[in-house]
Image (cartoon, rainbow, N blue to C red):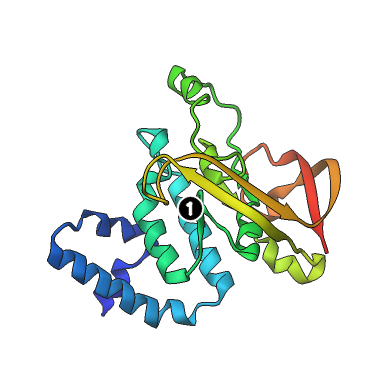
Amino acid sequence: MRQLRRAMRLDEVSEFQDLRSKEDEKWRDDVLRSYAKQTFSTFEEDMLDAAWRRFVEAYSQRQITFRTDTLPAISGIANRWSRMSKRRYLCGLWADDDGLLVGLTWIIRSKGAKTEDRETKALSNTYIAPSWSWASTQQEVFWVDVRNKASEFLVKIDVQNSNCLCSGPDPFGRVTSGWIVITGKVMSIPKLRADLSGWEPMDEHRCKELTLYLVLH
């Protein structure tokens, strides 16, 4: 059992992608079902969301050879995650109200100005994902868990409509467009100078200029 539990660590889940034989496929599915029953059944939704965000944070640190593979490279993981969580996948996020609310609050981890190379400039015009998805950026991302402050700020949105159009038959693969329609009470704060050091370790560029949109209920 120790080996099975270790095999399902998120940073090692890619090992399953290399299993190709029918025996391996059956073994993999049995392990996933067992893991889902023993572990995911005891997870609170917030814990499940947090685990996905930690996975994406780690994934965003990787150097992908072809940026257009950002979503296809994790399609297998997303597929199995969707089956275990019973949630609808949406360009790297999850489409239920609470999961989408937190998922949309990703932040680019600033590492100072970067010199764009020729390939980066060319890819800037290549469609990867909607701008509201973390997959649309070439940068490392992280989340500040706003759900911990939900009771204080009474954060609430209603997802009216959402969809992503895929370029092929895989609903977890490459996308050609996507949209979300959400409702909620919003207050705009145009500019704010804030020290984010209490949220996440930063380099010398610790003081950021932000545009905030507070969703109020």
The residue that appears at 74% across and 67% down in the rendered structure is: 150
Q: Nearer the viewer, residue 154 or 139?
A: 154
Q: Position of residue 199 (x, y in %)?
A: 67, 55
Quarter of the image for the N terminus: give it: bottom left
The residue that appears at 69% across and 68% down in the rendered structure is: 148
Q: Is residue 101 left or right of residue 119?
A: right
Quarter of the view holding residue 208 = top right
Q: Position of residue 205 (x, y in %)?
A: 67, 37
Report the amino acid beneath label 1: Val
Q: Total marks drawn?
A: 1
Quarter of the view holding residue 24 = bottom left
- Vertical side of 26 occupied by 102: above or below: above
Quarter of the view holding residue 192 = top right
Residue situated furthest top in the rendering: 118
Residue 144 visible in this rendered orientation of the protein: no
Q: Position of residue 213 (x, y in %)?
A: 79, 48
The residue that appears at 49% across and 44% down in the rendered structure is: 165
Quarter of the image for the C terminus: give it: bottom right
SS for callout 1 = helix
Residue 1 visible in this rendered orientation of the protein: yes
How many residues crowd mark 1 within 10 Å: few (<14), some (14–19), many (20+)? many
Q: Is residue 41 left or right of residue 27?
A: right
Q: Position of residue 79 (x, y in %)?
A: 39, 59
- Vertical side of 2 occupied by 208: above or below: above
Give the labeled residue for mark 1: 56
